[in-house]
Amino acid sequence: MPRVFGTSLFAALLVSAVLPAPAGADTPTNAYIVLLADGVHASSVSSVAADHGTTVHHVYDSAVRGYSGRMTAAAAARLARDPRVALVQPDGVATTAAQTMPTGIDRVDAELSPTARIDGGDQRVSVDVAVIDTGVDLDHPDLNVYTAGAKNCSTGRTADDGNGHGTHVAGTIGALDNGDGVVGVAPGARIWPVRVLSNSGSGSWSDVICGIDYVTAHAAEIEVANMSLGGSGTDSACGTNKDAMHEAICRSVAAGVTYVVAAGNSAADSSTFVPAAYDEVITVSALADFNGQPGGGAAATCRSDVDDTFADFSNYGADVDLIALGVCILSTWKGGGYDTISGTSMASPHVAGGAALYKATHPSASPGTVKSALQAAGTSQWNTATDPDSTHEPLLNVATF
């Protein structure tokens, strides 16, 4: 059974994002800020609060004198008439106005790409990318989701993401360059949500083939497909009818769709995992990098690993074509939020974003040409000595795309 190479296989790698509430978040219910009148000291907070049935949260004694807390609207009205009080104000929600460039986007030099044009101006790369996954948050404010192209091959009624994994993948590919949240490798790429996995992050091969079949039906519109999922299996030649999913991918690639897939998280040779073992796809391993810069030495953040080294969970081997960051990656999440998780599931969409940038300026390029271009542009600026095998895949770099 296929599963995502991120949250389901490696639930222990999941770390909550440290981002403020997204814009538009609800104001805390019955929450107020109270300023005391001149001459009334902060030591009086407890008695003022007790007199009006307030549950105190913060006490202020330097910039202002007062407190914050919860109370009913009626209690707030009574409190406002208390001579010890200067102001009773409903609480609100503050959000960041800045946009974060995740480490993976920085490390692949997406900000130098003349096609990505990352500058906060909300330019959008005109390219279509299918995310074959747990679905995508259909109305995430930091994603350009093509809802008319959504397809559900799994449980539930829609392609909306009930897991978070697919939304995370989508953000790394194409989060908007809008000054908020995060930014993707190919900002504003049109995301086609193709849901083949359940809310638990698992599904059947038949569901996955349904997704591939759908993408192939729209091969004239979709340039790139990302599959951050997989399971046990081996390679076989196209046309031998030994593996239905492989036959589906062979035909989809022949129709012009570039497939990018995760190598897997078993610290094993990827030749025993599919679709990673297929020659027709671009298979991606994971690099641990905690500051988005080469050279190593950065302190670990969300999980233990060594900066600028082959991720300790990543699959490896001759079937791997490229490496990209897959440890402690910040991206979009279900419910309009953001999260930080790890896995080769997170490395693959960096490369899918790179493929999208290349296709945006080389629309007639075949999937084989896209793979060769990405490999040729890659670098060896990572600690290749930590690679478990002798085939050191290039590190994705999109500066010239």
Image (spheres, rainbow, N blue to C red):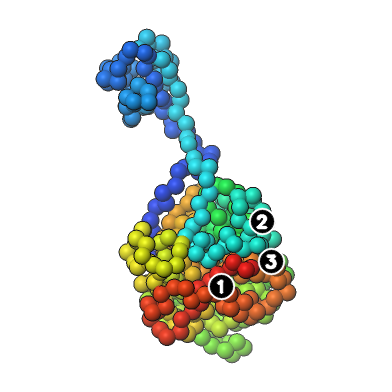
Q: x, y (%) of residue 16?
A: 39, 52
Residue at image mark 2:
124
- Say which element carries label 3: helix
Asked whether residue 188 appears in the rendered view, the answer is yes
Residue type pointed to by label 3: Ala
Q: x, y (%) of residue 74?
A: 42, 17
Q: Which mark is residue 260?
A: 1
Q: Which residue is drawn at 33% across and 29% down?
A: 58
Residue 40, image quadrant: top left
Q: x, y (%) of residue 359?
A: 67, 69
Residue type pointed to by label 2: Arg
What is the spatial separation of the Cα atoms under label 2 and label 3, in whole angstroms? 11 Å
Q: Residues within 10 Å of mark 1 (few under 14, many from 20)?
A: many
Residue 299, image quadrant: bottom left
What is the spatial separation of the Cα atoms under label 1 and label 2, in whole angstroms? 21 Å
Q: In this view of the protein, which residue sits in the foreground, 373 or 147?
A: 373
In the picture, measured across the screen, residue 385 lies left or right of residue 138, that is left
Q: Residue at x 44, y 28 (%)?
A: 91
Residue at image mark 3:
360
Quadrant location, the N terminus: bottom left
Kindly report which numbered mark, 3 or 1, lies closer to the viewer in this rendering.
3
Q: In this view, does 340 lie above or below 209?
A: above
Q: In this view of the protein, which residue sits in the foreground, 182 or 256?
A: 182
Q: In this view of the protein, which residue sits in the foreground, 98 or 50?
A: 98
Please tell me which of labels 1 and 2 falls first in the chain: 2
Quadrant location, the C terminus: bottom right
